[in-house]
Image (spheres, rainbow, N blue to C red):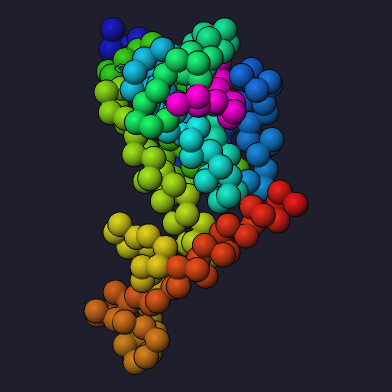
Amino acid sequence: MENNQEQQVVSMPRIGDAAPEFTAITTQGEINFPSDYKGEWVILFSHPADFTPVCTSEFMTFATMEDQFAKANCKLVGLSIDGLYSHIAWLRTIKEKIEYKGMKDVEVNFPLIEDIKMDVAKKYGMIQPNEDSTKAVRAVFFIDPKGIIRTIIYYPLSLGRNFDELYRVVVALQAADEFKIATPADWRPGDDVIISPAGSCGAAKGRMEDEELDCKDWFFCTKKLDKDVVLDKILKKETQSVE
Ligand code: BEZ
């Protein structure tokens, strides 16, 4: 049993790796990943199974937020170890029958990958056999416009994701790239940001004397970054790419 479990975990991509490539059938036609998403951020996420309640609540939430992610130049791609017809039937059921937390008539327009053979799930380490050997865990891969994995979050089968956090991650990653800063705990646009640690004694002294910085100590300096400046930069790109 232990050997079987080890064999099923074929690979575990890591932060900083190029996103493993694949071609797959989805509810929106064939996709070539990540090349079809070049120039855009993309969240590739897995869910355990169609026609299950936690996954249904998640899909309704993600579909409802799809425009919000699109404004941050971020596309969504889902996956489960189910076939295309199951996916289609489930998404139709969600639209026609399910009302949840004020969401109803919800149409899922982003692609949902069929992965009966687990080819993609294995490439991305989405099968974690000690949790379940036939269902994908709730994995979330944040992939940047160059196809590099920038953040990975895993949840177990029983725990529905926090979609505000997923959106926060997309914005924070882009803010870090755009403004060459880091973001502290629980950061949201408008909060102070962290500048990279001083790399020399001279830089450490300079930091402490810089009136634009708020240094708690030489290694821990923050600065103001206006919310509108952050959002303008991040949301503007989507407007440009749509035009
Ligand atoms: C769900 O999505 O409801 C679910 C899926 C697999 C195991 C437990 C819950």
Q: Which residues are magenta?
A: 104-118
Observer-nearest residue: 63 or 170? 63
Direction left: furthest residue? 216
Identity of the residue drawn at 40% across and 68% down:
190
Expressed as whole percent of the image width and height from the top left, the position of residue 121 reads 48, 21
Q: Would residue 120 appear left or right of 166 to someone viewing this image?
A: right
| Snapshot quadrant of residue 126 | top left
Q: Would residue 3 appear left or right of 95 to someone viewing this image?
A: left
Q: Would residue 104 appear left or right of 6 to someone viewing this image?
A: right
Residue 189 in sight in this render? yes
Expressed as whole percent of the image width and height from the top left, the position of residue 219 reads 29, 75
Expressed as whole percent of the image width and height from the top left, the position of residue 2 reads 28, 12
Q: Quadrant of ligand 1?
A: top left
Residue 10 in sight in this render? no
Expressed as whole percent of the image width and height from the top left, the position of residue 35 reads 68, 36
Q: Would residue 160 appear left or right of 148 to someone viewing this image?
A: left
